[in-house]
Image (cartoon, rainbow, N blue to C red):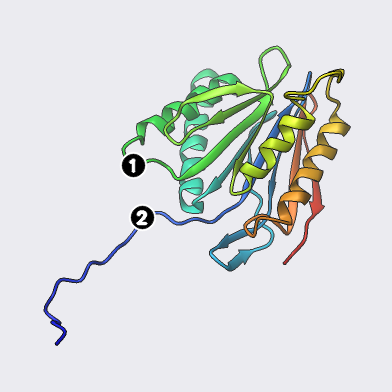
Amino acid sequence: MEDYRAPVEVQWSPYSWNGGTVLAVSGEDFSVIASDTRLSEGFQIYSRDFPKTYQLGDNVVLGSCGFQGDVTTLNKVIEAQLKIYDHIYQKKMSCESLAQLLSTILYTRRFFPYYTYNILAGLDSKGKGCVFSFDPIGSYEREVYRAGGSASSMLQPLLDNQIGLLNQTGVEKKPLSVEKAVQLVTDVFTSAAERDIYTGDGIRINIISADGVDIKEVPLRRD
């Protein structure tokens, strides 16, 4: 006979997984950062128009996905720090400084990390395109291209092949143009939407240059 007095284990997690994918590519004098626009959990779609890129300055954009509650909180903390910096120094924070700031914010939460995948893209102090990728506790590095989020394992090999030209011989490596970067981003997201249920509905592409941030939207499959 079953003993109903036996202890029952109840599991609870402070995190949730809302999916999404972010991707950034840097060129000689530009950066491109994009995300899909689907916000979901499990097999439920909460929104089809929820991009995961956040403009933090005239030529700096953060791509962040994962647990949307932590993404929102993290962005509020960053925006507060940027306002403090602006009031004290009367200028905008550079992309390199913002990368260090984000690293510090993430590290302060290392014992209870933000459940987010973060990629920062923009122009450095010399006007060159730059991309910084982060792990959950703040370690970061500057890269030419990086994918993060639910479809990153599918996007990264495509970028390695098309941009990094890894393990290829007899192929001339040419400077990446804005048009080529945008087309590559569109193609890899289209491919990911065919395989990953958390990626879809649309792409928000941010093209960062000395003139500012230009936004382009491309539809994806909606099922």
Q: Is 175 situated left or right of 1 in this image?
A: right
Point out the tag, 2 or 1, that comes first from the N-terminus.
Answer: 2
What residue is drawn where x is 86% and y is 18%? 170
Given the current orientation, which residue lies at the most extreme bottom position? 1
Q: What residue type is disc 1 on?
A: Phe
Q: Is residue 40 above or below residue 55?
A: below
Q: Residues within 10 Å of mark 1 (few under 14, many from 20)?
A: few
Question: Are the residues flagged by discs 2 and 1 in contact, CB closer than 8 Å?
Answer: yes
Q: Which residue is mark 1?
A: 112
Given the current orientation, which residue lies at the most extreme top position? 126
Q: CA distance from mark 2 to mark 1?
A: 10 Å
Quadrant location of the N terminus?
bottom left
What residue is drawn where x is 74% and y is 57%? 194
Q: Is residue 141 above or below residue 217?
A: above
Q: Is residue 135 visible?
A: yes
Q: Is 28 situated left or right of 88 in this image?
A: right
**Secondary structure at numbered mark 1:** loop
Q: Which residue is mark 2?
A: 14
Q: Is 78 situated left or right of 203 in this image?
A: left
Q: What residue type is disc 2 on?
A: Pro
